[in-house]
Image (cartoon, grey):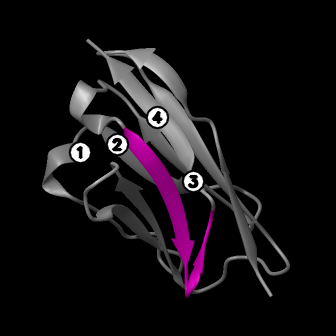
Amino acid sequence: QVQLVESGGGLVQAGGSLRLSCTASGRTFSSAVVNWFRQTPGKEREWVARINWSGGVTTYTDSVKGRFTISRGNAKNTVYLQMNSLKPEDTAVYYCNYEWYWGQGTQVTVSS
């Protein structure tokens, strides 16, 4: 019904920035919560940020507040995660989540 695809990951030095994208096919985002999660091998998946599509209210985990920004694109099938002032501890596979759908993830690696 819905397929999510993340992109924009890569290797960046500490203090750098990356912009992740999540694109949905099959159905557009509408009046729903879209989340970003991240996971490091051997650890549980961690919630990072969410945006309420209706109203645009955003919420973040404490460790990324002031550094990450989740936003919606002009097209209703796209959501972004702007990541600034990246730290090595941000290294993880980042996943987009919408309703019960998940993307395959995009790798973010931050070197010191």
Residue 41 place in picture, x, y as percent: 34, 50
SS at mark 1?
helix
Category of crowding for the residue at label 1, using alpha-carbon neighbours closer than 10 angstroms: few (below 14), some (14–19), many (at least 20):
some
Circle 4 sits in a helix, a strand or a loop, which is it?
strand
Disc 4 crowd, CA 10 A, few/some/many (<14, 14-19, 20+)? many
Mark 2 secondary-structure assignment: strand
Q: Amino acid at mark 1?
A: Val
Residue 108 at x, y percent in the picture: 46, 34
Per the rendering, the mark at residue 64 is 1
* Residue span colored magenta: 92-103
Is residue 53 part of the magenta span, yes or no? no
Identify the mark at residue 108; answer none if there is no mark: 4
**Quick one: label 4 or label 2, which is nearer the N terminus?**
2
| Residue 1 percent across, percent down from the top left | 80, 88
Q: Is residue 97 above or below residue 78?
A: below
Question: What amino acid does circle 4 point to?
Answer: Val
At horizontal 34% and vertical 42% (from top left) the residue drawn is: 68
Residue that badge 3 annotates: 105
Query: Which circle, 4 or 2, is nearer the viewer?
Result: 4
